[in-house]
Amino acid sequence: MAERVRPLVITIDGPAASGKGTLARRLAWHLGLRHLDSGLLYRATALRLRCAGEGATNVTAAVAAAAAVTEADLTDAALRQPAISGLASEVAAIPAVRTAVLALQRAVASTPPGAVIDGRDIGTVVCPDATVKLFLDARPDVRAARRAADHPDSDPATVAAELAERDRRDTVRAVAPLAVAPDATVIDTSALDAEAVFAVALAVVRRKAGLEP
Ligand code: DC
């Protein structure tokens, strides 16, 4: 009988603008794995909810929106709008919304050859048995400057305030808050560029997953 190879699952958690999306894409490409940005699931839920003319206070509508999300939703450019960022953080605090998007994330993780999944609770809740867990962090001022650079037409002070509010909501919520898994490797990206973050992370992945250099 053929030996069953366990999918290689790399989780990358961290606050907004810590560099996890860029790192996840690069690691996935380099290692030939799929990449899932789990934040897009909450953003797609928010977009569907807004298109239905509803807000996060309508829990039934929010859960229905989350249950309807498919991978085809995740390429919509509107998901990156600042208004959707705020609403995504609100719907992400609803426990039944989180349950509704769990199956899709676990399906990606369990499909060979494996995946890099980034988010807030991937190493703690979604994939507690992941092969490698990373947690990216950076100083709040550095993250605000990165996010402001992504949105040059926005007021930097407003961008920083919205980021701080989102971090607060993502960290204090009762269900699956942003947290460092006990077995995660923390990388502070404040003083590192994308290339350096990739080099550090790849070395950790190779060591923990037992991959040849
Ligand atoms: O990473 P992002 O900014 O695209 O995420 C959008 C929102 O979704 C953010 O407020 C945090 C939330 N989120 C979450 O609660 N759990 C995840 N695994 C990923 C994102």
Image: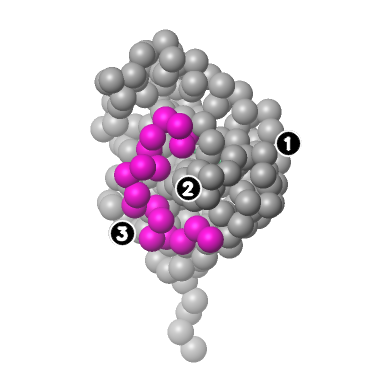
Residue 163 located within the stretch drawn in magenta: no
Choose the circle earlier in sequence order: 2 or 1.
2
Give the residue displayed 48% in from the left and 26% down from the top.
137
- Left or right of residue 193: residue 164: right
From the top left corner, tell me how far across and down residue 42 is, in percent: 52, 45
Residue 74 located within the stretch drawn in magenta: yes
35 lies above or below 146: below
- Of the residues shown, which amino acid type is indicated by label 2? Cys
Give the residue displayed 42% in from the left and 30% down from the top.
82
Give the crowd class for mark 3: few <14, some 14-19, many >=20 residues within 10 Å: few
Q: Please state the extent of the stretch shown in magenta in the rendering.
A: 68-85
Q: Which residue is mark 2?
A: 51
The circle drawn on residue 32 is 3
Mark 3 in CB contact with mark 1 (< 8 angstroms): no
The circle drawn on residue 174 is 1
Say which of marks 3 and 1 sits in front. Answer: 1
